[in-house]
Amino acid sequence: MATRDTWVSNLGFVLAAVGSAAGLGNIWRFPWLTAGNGGSAFLAVYLAIVVSVGVPGLLAEFVLGRRGRQTPMGALRSLTGSRWGSVLGAFNVLTTLLILSFYSVVGGWILRYTLVSPTGAYFAQPQQYFGAIGYGFEAVGFHLLFLGIVAGIVFFGVNRGIERVSKVMLPAVVVLLVGLAAWTATQPGTAAGYAFYLGFDGEYLFANFASVLGPAAGQALFTLSVGAGTMLTYASYIDEDSSLPRDTIVIAVSNTFIGVLAGLVVIPLLFSQGVDPGQGGPGALFVGLAAAFESLPGGRVVATAFFAAVLMAAVTSAISLLETPVATLVDAVGMPRRRATLLISGVLALTGTGLSLSAPIFQFVSGTVADLMLSVGLFAFLVIVGWMLREDAIAEFRAGAGRMGVLAPSWLFTVSWLLPVVVLFSLSSTLGSLVGVSLDLGSRVAVAVVLTFVCRAVVAVAVDG
Ligand code: TRP
């Protein structure tokens, strides 16, 4: 077999991973969820979960990738020594295909808004415009265009495609967003938006803690790209000199910075137009922002810059989602990368087309189904790292970590006890609301703790027996 692709430098890996993390989740989903969940209250809970759950979870995925040196199917199979590992890896691959199917549809909308912003095509009637282009045959066309761009990059491989593109696009996203945030600060009517976003509202937080927790946890996983094996795949291309804990912290901080920055643009602009943030919603964001761009000076230029930034962020995330199934075909059956790229893109062209024709299916898949699959995927990673690998995981954490290696035991403890409870908590809440059962916060925590012990016992029997 040919030698595996690798990153040219550790910086290249970090930029590509931040590129994967920072995407539509930060710029489109985060401000909208924040606005709909009490602003600063959501921000506070979300930041706490990123630190306590997201960072150790991401680190677990990196450990699996670098230890396994393969895409999810091969890596989990060799690390667990069981065929169940391949099944879990295949589940990861399915998750990336599913997420990319809807991601590419949204990417198509963004691509269209970038192209038409210079003419102000949607300025006059934002609501009708979004209503007309969101789903249907034109949406299919732009989905295919977006997918084509993403496939064109993955086609060229890890260092000549992904690493190169990330090194250019990610800094461009940051520069554009900083400029836009500065521009926003000079606009009239934005003060209330900043107060809502940055002022700390302890009372709201206290009253709504239980309902803010679920969306905040889901968002923390989605934004860090945890649970689908894409970060595992990226980590399989790095060497033992890189410090995994350091890289993880750099990635999480940069990703959060980009999310908060996007909020500094979007939320004040929505407020300046008197858009009720509680009414949020994915489409309302396009519509509310369009109204702001319409009425403010230089709106067309600013709108173009904004959507171009979102587009680039979306592309660097989508390439990580495509890389996982493509590299799996390369690893597992030795298919040449270019042929694998064409094959997988062909599948995604079809699945994405299905979603761009049906709004209800689109919403179900992009919300509930994606959240569930990511939680299951992360849970499997936690079980393997925290309950099976243990000492090996500590060794992998320490390789290249220098003095940060002392953190390994507390990390492993978090991964084996705290995180499974949190993930089972959000998993059982989502499942519960699907079947119409809703428990209070205390009972939900109790269910999660009991389930964790049950799973622990099952795994112990399976592994030792
Ligand atoms: N994190 C990206 C975003 O915020 C999306 C993404 C890329 C992703 N790879 C992923 C989400 C893997 C979940 C799992 O837009």
Image (cartoon, rainbow, N blue to C red):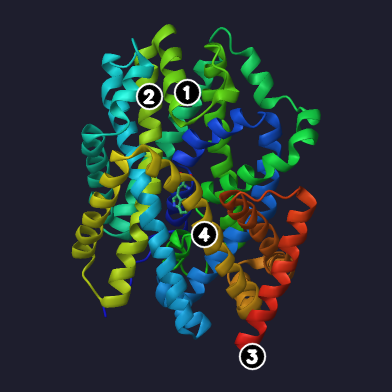
Disc 1 to disc 3: CB gap under 8 Å = no
Give the number of the mark in front: 2 or 3: 3
Mark 4, secondary structure of its residue: loop
Q: Which residue lies under the disc numbered 1?
A: 179
Question: Considering only order in the chain, which callout, 3 or 2, is on the residue closer to the N terminus?
Answer: 2
Measured Cα–Cα span from mark 4 to mark 2: 31 Å
**Circle nearer the N terminus (1, 4):** 1
Residue 160 percent across, percent down from the top left: 28, 56
Q: Amino acid at mark 3?
A: Asp
Callout 2 secondary element: helix
Kind of residue at disc 4: Gly
Report the residue marked by disc 3.
Answer: 464
Q: Amino acid at mark 1?
A: Gly
> Which residue does the image show at 64% across and 32% down from the upper left?
37
Give the distance between the C-alpha atoms of the residues marked 2 and 1, in whole angstroms.
9 Å
- Write down the residue under mark 4: 227
Which type of secondary structure does the marked residue at label 3 adopt?
A: helix
- Within 10 Å of the Cα at label 3, are there few (<14), some (14-19), or many (20+) other Cα atoms? few
Counting labels gives: 4
Regarding residue 240, the answer to whether it shows in the image is no
Residue 138 horizontal/vertical position (percent): 22, 32
Task: Tell me where residue 140 appears, x and y as whole percent.
Answer: 24, 39
Residue pushed farthest front? Answer: 436
Give the answer, above or below, for where 401 lies relative to 39.
below
Looking at this view, is 271 or 406 the one in front?
271
- Work out how far the residue at label 2 is from the one at label 3, CA to CA, in angstroms: 57 Å
Label 2: how many Cα within 10 Å (few below 14, some 14–19, many 20+): many
Q: CA distance from mark 4 to mark 3?
A: 26 Å
Label ID, residue 305? 2
Q: Is residue 189 above or below residue 348?
A: above
